[in-house]
Amino acid sequence: MNRLTKLILTSALILIIASLSWSYDTEHVVVVLIDGVRYTESFGDTTGTYCPRLTALQSQGVVHDSAFNDVATYTSMAVPATFMGRFYALQDTSYLGEDVQFCRYPTFWEYARADLGLSDIDAIYITPDYGSGTWLPSFYPGYGPDYWPSFHQSANSDAAVFDSALAVITRDHPVISYVYFPETDHAGHTADWNYYISAIREADSLTACLWDSIQADPVMAGKTTMIVTNDHGRHDDAHGGFQGHGCDCFGCRHVMLFAIGPDFKRGDHVDSPRASITDIATTIGELLEFNTTFCTGRVLLEIFGDSYDYLPGDCNMYAGSWPPVTIGADVTYLVNYFRGISTPCLQDGFYASGDANGDCTIIGSDVTYLVNYFRGINPVNYCPDYPPTWLSPEDLPGEAPNTWPGCE
């Protein structure tokens, strides 16, 4: 076997290993948005008084206790932010003879359909029938109506939305679904406390029933991730109480974020780094492996199973001191590793911080990749089998975790 043949075979093997390493078990994602639940009535109440079913499901999933809408705590901005992956005011236009509002940037349905070649029945949008008032995806060049989801609209109640969602999800087994429950927000605005908490309990029960039905479906069971969130909370008692929202008080900004599925932690709570509702689209893109080019959110790595405390490219783990940082000395350290001089910090037997190109192998090209990072040519990547707790210095907590530096 000549040298060129060996090189070709080695490169092919590396590509095969990398392609296998980047896959997740999730094949379907369902986002459930419960409009306008104040956190004190959802997971802020650890007894589960108003959300008993989702509280019980926490043993199978992960709760992010520091999830927020920090930009615009009203529905017409916040709901589109969850599927656009960024906050941006909607645009008015006339479309098919109707006055409508549409997203200025692509939505996760459009990204998924464009990148994965999905049909419209693989991407669904389930809402009450608001007619021309339904917020539309984008007309962004390269995306737009050819990549919109299929719309499934029902009567204006959570029960009707649930019936529609259950029928279409268990029939078509879509890859990416968005289910919008509006009734809690409507109830809150009536200033009727009993109606408000009744609506929360109904949405809680319907969401759990949807999950149970998915787990009973032979196509989707064990392969589906569900993310449950809110667009905004409601005023805390110091700012007017539950009947309103729209300001920047803590009650309006703090939201629920619950994730359950094969790739996430189980029975866990996380509270760092701080999460945004705009992170949902980017996280779904990570799970289903499609680009989210114009999203401003980050991947919520902290909710994934078995995250590891390291910063990508920090090959020397900053000598164990805090905070970690990726600097030129890391190139020298990695070179010395190949020379047999450096003894790296391992994560479950793998030199994760040294895998600069993210192909789940430690080879000489990682040095080149890291050098090119400092030259501004490419980012530092990571092996998805060893997801880092922090992607950048901005994600680092103020103090080192008790497990740092976590070497074997």
Image (tube, grey):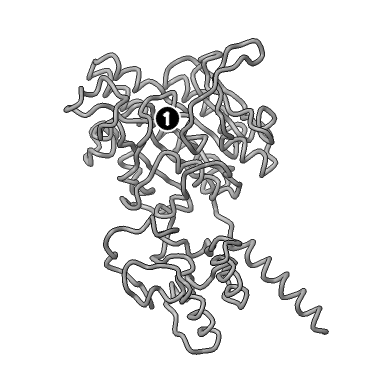
Q: Quadrant of the C terminus?
A: bottom left
Mark 1 — residue? 78
Q: Position of residue 176 (x, y in %)?
A: 57, 38
Q: Position of residue 390 (x, y in %)?
A: 41, 59
Judge whether 359 appears above or below 214 on screen: below
Judge whether 261 appears above or below 111 on screen: below
> Can you name the residue that lies furthest to the right here?
2
Report whether 38 appears left or right of 101: left
> Looking at the image, which residue is at 55% across and 13% down?
131
> Looking at the image, which residue is at 49% across and 18% down?
128
> Looking at the image, which residue is at 38% across and 74% down?
318
- The kind of secondary structure element at disc 1 is helix
Report whether 208 appears left or right of 154: left
The part of the image, by quadrant, that contains residue 378 is bottom right
Amino acid bearing label 1: Ala
> Can you name the residue that lies furthest to the left here?
238
